[in-house]
Amino acid sequence: MLFGNALALCVQFMGQLIIRKLLRLELKLDMCNKLFNAFLLILFLTGVYACSSDNETGFKIYDGNKVVPIYIDENTTDLIKWAAEELATDIEGLTGTKPEVKFTSSNNSSGIYIGTFKDHLNLPTDFKFSLHEEKEAFSLKNHKNSLYIIGSDVRGTVYGVFEVAERLGISPFKWWADVEPIKQESLGLNLPLDGVTEHPSVAYRGIFLNDEDWGLQPWAAKTFEPETGDIGPRTYERIFQLLLRLKANTIWPAMHPCTQGFFTVDGNKEMAQKYHMVIGTSHAEPMLRNNVSEWKQDHSKYNYTTNKQDINAYWQSRLDQLKQGDNQAIFTLGMRGIHDSGMQGIKDREEGITLLQDIVDNQRTMLASTFEKPIKNIPQVFIPYKEVLELYDAGMDIPEDVTLMWTDDNYGYVRRLSTEKDQQRPGGSGVYYHLSYWGRPHDYLWLSTAQPGLIWYEMTKAYANGAKRIWIANVGDIKPAEYNTEFFLDLAWDINILDQNTIPNHLKEWAAREFGAELANDISKLMNEYYRLAFLRKPEYMGWGQTEPTTQNNVSDFTVTEMRRRMEAYNKQIKMVDQLTKQIPKERLAAWFQLVVYPVKGAAYMNHKFLCLNLAAKTNEKAVKVEYVKQAELAFAQIEALTTHYNTALKDGKWNHMMSMKPRNLPVFHAPTADLLQKNDEQTDSLVIEANKIAISASDFETSNGTKEFQWKTVNGLGYSNAAVTLFPLRAKTFDENNPWLNYEFQVKEPGDYEVQLRVLPTHSNNFDHKVGLAVNNNSKTWFSVNTKGRSKVWKENVLRNAAIVKLPVQLNKAGTHQLQIAVNQTGIVLDQIAIYKLGAPSFYEIPLKANKQ
């Protein structure tokens, strides 16, 4: 929050309550009178203005004339020295004056002191910390006119430095999204009297660079690092700097055939050492080997049953390379085929278990022997992904000190949770989660549209069931997944930063930091709607085709009414972007384009392209048909123009080759053609029919019944309704009897045969046994399975529309009010929307929201 002048001391208490709770910025900066007056107006209207505070202390960094120095121990590590210089540069960006970074062994002068407990900073005797037992922790405290940033270790100190930078208004994406600092007349930092102490919720937190063929790799090779011609040390340096600003510590390097293996490029390994990065690899890359780049033999020889000696030597050579130098790593155990294919050389499940067990045992022997330490002290992870999960479920035994890393189903729904027995394992568990994906039923590599509410729900649920050791997000090319990446890593750092009521606050905080507090509310509304519309159907899926095998575009399942409503929703998005663009500070226009304009307008025009083609296919009026085709062509041209601007005009071509509007050149990205026009599908589709459909948000229940331990709660920002309902707490529990339920009321105008449709999120249970029970009036419940197993046709439909659909035919013998009860057999089932309509009425893709829900 930004505010200034002499009245600042009168609003410190309010700042603690509102700023910390809602925006977490707690800044004290002199800004223009307009912003300050707006801020005071909000205080008076909300009744929380306070004229004094005994709960905060303020530290002045820049008074308009001079800036305080930064002090570090001359014997501190190079990484802390780098972080101190970064903070000095950040402060210079805000004030125009760069603080001097000085060496000291005392605290006799006022300034900013940065270091670990072990550094010689002569910390005051009454300056108490409680971080000695925590890894990567830090404390911030104002003490006797100095600001102390003290970490429990090196990374903790660096995270503390960047926490201060962010509280001062510096975006972690300062370089990666060109969020330029805005000059301030004075600069200060407010902290609670007891200071701020933080430590991570998840031990290893990071990203997986993947499917980099159309963005990160060509940009690095042709624009940023042509001397390497690939993703090399200069690119990784920028990535590692970003990760430290996001309080992350782990990287799974890029590994597609278009990219050289991480360890084969000179300088990559050393850059990871410089920035204290932990290197790991995906489920398909055991023992830190990039098979697609480094396995030089024929792929058929990557078979442990026939070529065990060569494969062991291949793995051992990487361990020998890592033994030299200060390398930090997590070793992936097990084996799959080359590049995400199944393991070779096994005939059945039993043979697979035996072979995989032998592989893991041999790998652990290599690790212990090479690094000459107990195997339990070497970080290892086993990732039961795809067919390997079946082997694990069938009885494969993984040593207790190895971390089990569960995965989502590639579409955001975690496939497996740790059981109570799993949670007792010393190695713990973690999650590999997709924010970007290449594969069937369809890629989503272009825009990042994962709903923050879904990320929160799935990852918080995983954490509640023991996934606290390692979180990795597949972020594709990093851009344009900036916000989703930050959201994911913020949760990994502090799982309690949000609850089911406050998820949208994170987006408001982000918008305020990036574009100013005055615009934060409007921007967060814009982006929440962007994610909600994509939850119903991602822009990459609008061609209604599939991949692997790739099919051509098809007629949409949307009705004409739904198409028009959806186009209007996206028109509102475009209009709002244009209105807000006029108010964005000039320093932030490049960031605005990258973080908001391109994704929002890109999604809008992709929808327009296909919706217009579909509307053209559903009319017989020639002039109308021609006009719709023109609009589709214009929408495609707009996507081309936006992409060209991204690659060539932004920051003098800084991001040239980063943004592709056609990853994998799938049919959905092609220019509009007349193919769909040949599929004229006349249908009875009117507002009258839709008006007779009763739409209910799952959160609009009349009564509820939980258990002593579990209660129903609404998750704000989850589902197409933005208000999905589930049981809390989120730990896994099956109810053998007394199933929790929700009651709803609805009215029909005339008796007859109806159908009740319930939409739940396509979440998973370990045993594929999620069930919901539906009953109308006093009838007995009919139970439905809402789980899918594997990549069935139903699972594909469910993940593309983010809904598993249950339909119950009912006979209603009278007009008027009726009762619907919905029960569940276990936690982890998320109710989103309900519809009731005449049996045999035309089907609808969408259950529309009530006006007050949008």
Image (tube, helix red, strand yellow):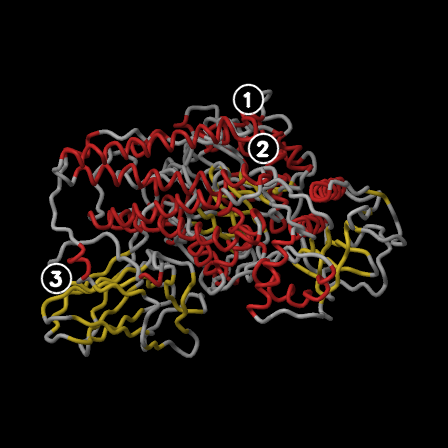
First of labels 1, 3 by sequence position: 1
Which badge, 3 or 2, is on the more N-terminal residue? Answer: 2
Q: For the point 64% across and 28% down, which residue is it?
A: 267
Give the quarter of the image for residue 703: bottom left
| Nearer to us in this view, 427 or 66 | 66
Using the numbered discs, state the Cα–Cα distance from disc 1 to disc 2 in whole angstroms.
23 Å
SS for dot 3: loop
Q: Name the residue under label 1.
A: 229
> What numbered label is drawn on residue 839?
3
Please state, as top left, top right, bottom left or bottom right, where the C terminus lies in the image. Answer: bottom left
1 and 2 marks in contact (CB < 8 Å): no
Q: Which amino acid does label 2 sit on?
A: Arg
Q: Where is residue 769 in the image (x, y as percent from the top left)?
A: 30, 62
Give the residue number, with chain letter if any, for mark 2: 318
- The amino acid beneath tag 1 is Gly
- Left or right, residue 77 beside residue 435: right
The picture places residue 500, in percent across and down from the top left corner, at 46, 64
Q: Is residue 428 above or below residue 571?
A: below
Task: Bin the neighbour count of mark 2 within 10 Å (Cα to Cα): few under 14, some 14-19, many 20 and up.
Answer: some
